[in-house]
Image: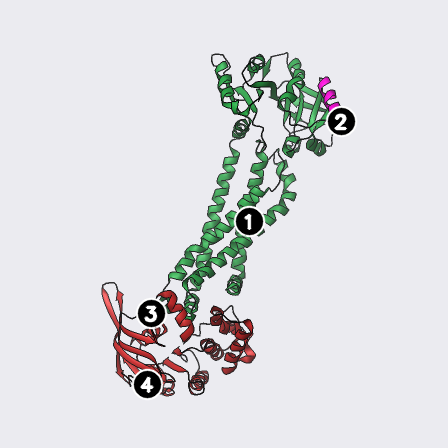
Chain colours: A green, B red
Amino acid sequence: MIKLIRRNLLRNKRRTFLTMASLAMALFILSLLGVVNDAMSFADESEIPDRLVVRNAISLTFPLPEAYEQRLRTIDNVVAVTPQNWFQGVYKDQRPENFFPRFTVDPETFRSVFYDYTWNEEEWEAFAEQRTAFAAGRELTEIQGWSIGDTITIKGDIYPIDVELQLRAIFDYDEPGQERQIFFHRRYVEEAMGNPGQNGTYWLRLDDPNAAPAVIAAAEAMFENSDNQVRAETAEAFAASFTEMLGNIQFFFTMIGLAIVISIFLITANTMAMAARERTTEVSVLRTLGFRRNQVLGMVIGESLAVGVLGSLLGVGFTAVAIQGATPFLEQMGFGFGGFALDSQVLVTAVTIGISVGLLSGVFPAVAAARLKIVDGLRRL
Amino acid sequence: MAETVVQMRDVTKNYRRDAFELKVLQGITLNVEAGDFVALMGPSGSGKSTLLNLLAGIDQPSSGDLVVAGEQVSRMNESRLARWRQRHIGFIFQFYNLIPVLTAYENVELPLTLRRGSRAARKRRVETALSVVGLQNRMKHYPRQLSGGQEQRVAIARAIVTDPTLLLADEPTGDLDADSGREILDLLGQLNEQFNKTILMVTHDPTAAARAKRLVRLDKGLLVSGDAGAGS
């Protein structure tokens, strides 16, 4: 049986190869979209459940008064609050490789909320003491070739100021994506801007993750009657809304992926049906020789399954190899702050889809072949 | 007294085509003894192939009794029929119907792969079948590398490799030139004479029919001449 499946696959080598290659190519694109999707995700998989974000209820682009920090600190179960602001600007030029997330923070409170970064204490002290200092993730320093003491300038585009910063600390984090950002003093920007007294977000640390719903409700209620109402949410929800700001690209990618899967299923199903139809007489001959219906069923499904398995392996293999070469290109395109890696979830999804496409595309022709009356099949000479 | 391999009693076969019912076989009664070589002749549409299909268990009669190799073929389900065919029937097609992706050896081996048995035992049987048809030196050839006559000999080897009770041949010389046809008929004669194989052969060719021990004629679904066989 296996020999017959193998030989039948090789019967029309070009067709088998093209079917397999189209499946492999579809899975390659699908895996690549998955990888890019992952890289674009701001959500930290190990997201700390005891952190909440408070922002302007209208949009992230509207700031909140500085005074909110103190008021938020008075909510039950809130043990620490720290502000964080996105600094929109240009480092060197507009090329994508020179783009990285940059936030202004308050060193006095930063670590009480973001306690999961790893610092060299001496470097941290140097960073905290110097108003023009910045701290960068290790991966970013490696990409940019920065060393402690180096100076960079970021030209503000929304902000009407340029900031000149000196690298004083390098931090590590469990997830590489988090090491591609920089932090610098919020006070530095505030002073340069004439002390407007505003912040983009406040990050809250709770003493009990189960208190999150109550804290969210309390925070929103606290500013309900003010000019700047707030929206409080978990860090994960915040990351998701940040992604939404990118025009829901992930959803777009998922739709592309779905379209690819459906197209490739139809192509493979048609090819398998064609291959099975061409062998109607042979199937009837096999059944005349004593092959049972389920053996014929197994043979036809086995062929399409083999196409699915080989196509999947080819596809993810190609992705794994290509991801290395494609990473700089994708980064240049501006995709991803989190770094590219073919993780097991993307891999398993791609292989599962490939095998399912192979299996399902073989089911209909297999059932048709198995149900065909032998005499009808023999008449089709 | 020879064992009766085929016992047909009042067998009919009707096909429904839209509103019409086609009566292809109308009450056929026929016996075939073990070791017999029966030629079944008749014009196109007379029901020869349908009769052969019923005997092979690849089609079911509309009514009547059909016992082949001691079993009521008409009462078996699909799965049992498949096993029964495997054990008792060797089928030789007009157009050989070899599997093109398999070699001569592998084509002959195919029915044996459905049975239990060692690879060595299988090899012995395949080699014996191929040597009976004179193709022991063509084992590794694919069907496309063989002549029509050689292909039909491989098909005969495939039909006899399981040592079936009954060999059914559907116009086995119909697609061959005269010389090749003669060789195939010699081979069938040899299988009947030397190996005592029971053969029922459908043919249009009177020369081929003359090689059989017994001739049965069908016309419009009726047995019109020839001995219906012992016990009828």
Q: Which comes before the other along the chain, label 1 or label 2?
A: 1
**Residue denoted by label 3:** B59
Q: Chain of mark 1?
A: A
Which amino acid is tagged 1?
Answer: Met
Residue B223 appears anywhere in the view: yes
As measured in the structure, the alpha-carbon distance from the residue carrying label 3 to the one carrying label 2 is: 87 Å
Where disc 3 sits, the SS reads loop
- Residue B52 is left or right of residue A203, and the answer is left
- In the image, which disc is placed on residue B215? 4
Q: Return the x and y of residue B87 as percentages of the image width and height.
A: 42, 73
Q: Chain of mark 4?
A: B
Which amino acid is tagged 4?
Answer: Leu
Residue at x-position 48% and y-position 72%: B112
Q: Do the residues indicated by labels 1 and 4 lie within the same chain of the protein?
A: no
Q: Chain of mark 2?
A: A
Q: Return the x and y of residue B13 as percentages of the image width and height.
A: 27, 71
Magenta stretch, residue numbers: A116-129
Of residues A220 and A316, the one nearer the viewer is A220
Where disc 2 sits, the SS reads loop
As measured in the structure, the alpha-carbon distance from the residue carrying label 3 to the one carrying label 4 is: 23 Å
**Residue denoted by label 2:** A148
Report the mark closest to the observer, 1 or 2. Answer: 2
Q: Is residue B12 magenta?
A: no
Secondary structure character of the magenta stretch overall: helix
User: Which quadrant does the C terminus of chain B fall into?
Assistant: bottom left
